[in-house]
Image: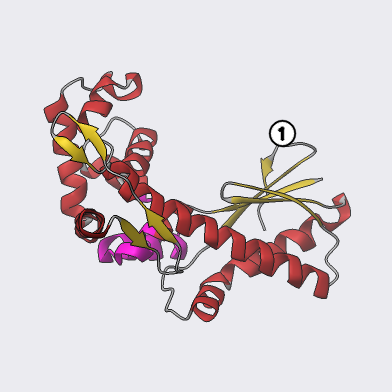
């Protein structure tokens, strides 16, 4: 059986760590405490008067990478709500007003790149940027600046989770064949009779991942991470597995 172990809301969690956004971290802690009563995307949908939870979710994960209002106004998924650039800019501004830590982090990253041409992640990964010509002259791409450091951090988190899982599985004689990493997921193959043991194993690895990140990279990782597990005979027919 295929076991797909997905890092829950990885890009959001890694940006919360980078920005130390208090509102976002408090929301995330509430979700982990009681996911049935607390949902970030439903809260934002209601707070910002968006048409659905899905739109609020998609918006958030574009917004953290500084998606421009013009892009929302021209995207069919969003233009059906409003094709006004001013409307989508007002939503962007409302998100920044709520998550001020992320807003300040974006501005700081843009300033650093403008001055040095690079960003260094908390794990030491160096991201270099090259300005491109525009009608205003040479400019750095703000979406790239906001995106690359977070995507790199997420990749490093998954890499560490994979390494810890692999070594720990060998030590504990977990019957699992590690197949691949797909973006923010670990994919393993295991016998049907071993699904529960494997699921419990990976759940525990991710519950301890914040401590592992703190130890290996000599920092204080204060945004808990969790995994979501799906099981199936193939990647197409995966179904959520509840522990």
Disc 1: CA contacts within 10 A as few (<14), some (14-19) or many (>=20): few
- In front of the other: 173 or 138: 138
Q: Residue at x 86, y 70 (%)?
A: 173
> Is residue 169 on the magenta stretch?
no
Write down the region rendered in magenta: 15-40
Q: Position of residue 159 (x, y in %)?
A: 60, 60
Residue 37 visible in this rendered orientation of the protein? no
Left or right for 140, reference 200: left
Q: Residue at x 33, y 18 (%)?
A: 76
Tell me the element at label 1: loop
Q: Position of residue 65 (x, y in %)?
A: 32, 44
Residue 88 in the image: above or below residue 185:
above
Report which residue position mark 1 lands on. 237
Q: Quadrant of residue 14?
A: bottom left
Residue 204 visible in this rendered orientation of the protein? yes
Q: Residue at x 26, y 55 (%)?
A: 113
Residue 67 in the image: above or below residue 127:
above
Q: Residue at x 56, y 75 (%)?
A: 212
> Is residue 21 on the magenta stretch?
yes
- In front of the other: 147 or 184: 147
Q: Quadrant of residue 17?
A: bottom left
Left or right for 68, reference 146: left
**Colour scheme shown:** secondary structure
Image quarter where the C terminus lies is bottom right
């Amino acid at each position: 059986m295929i076991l797909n172990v997905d890092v829950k809301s990885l890009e959001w969690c890694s940006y919360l760590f980078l920005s130390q956004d208090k509102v976002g971290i408090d929301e995330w802690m509430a979700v982990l405490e009681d996911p049935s009563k607390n949902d970030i995307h439903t809260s934002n949908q209601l707070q910002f008067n968006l048409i659905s939870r899905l739109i609020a979710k998609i918006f958030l994960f574009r917004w953290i990478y500084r998606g421009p209002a013009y892009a929302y106004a021209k995207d069919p998924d969003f233009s059906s709500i409003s094709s006004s650039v001013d409307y989508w800019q007002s939503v962007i501004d409302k998100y920044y007003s709520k998550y001020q830590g992320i807003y300040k982090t974006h501005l700081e990253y843009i300033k650093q790149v403008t001055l040095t041409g690079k960003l260094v992640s908390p794990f030491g990964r160096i991201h270099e940027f090259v300005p491109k010509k525009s009608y205003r002259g040479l400019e750095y791409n703000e979406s790239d600046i906001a995106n690359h450091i977070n995507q790199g951090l997420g990749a490093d988190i998954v890499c560490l989770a994979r390494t810890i899982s692999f070594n720990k599985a060998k030590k504990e004689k977990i019957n699992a064949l590690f197949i691949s990493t797909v973006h923010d997921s670990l994919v393993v193959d295991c016998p049907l009779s071993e699904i529960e043991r494997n699921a419990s194993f990976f759940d525990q690895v991710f519950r301890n991942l914040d401590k592992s990140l703190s130890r290996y990279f000599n920092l204080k990782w204060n945004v808990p991470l969790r995994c979501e597990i799906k099981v199936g005979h193939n990647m197409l027919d995966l179904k959520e597995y509840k522990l």
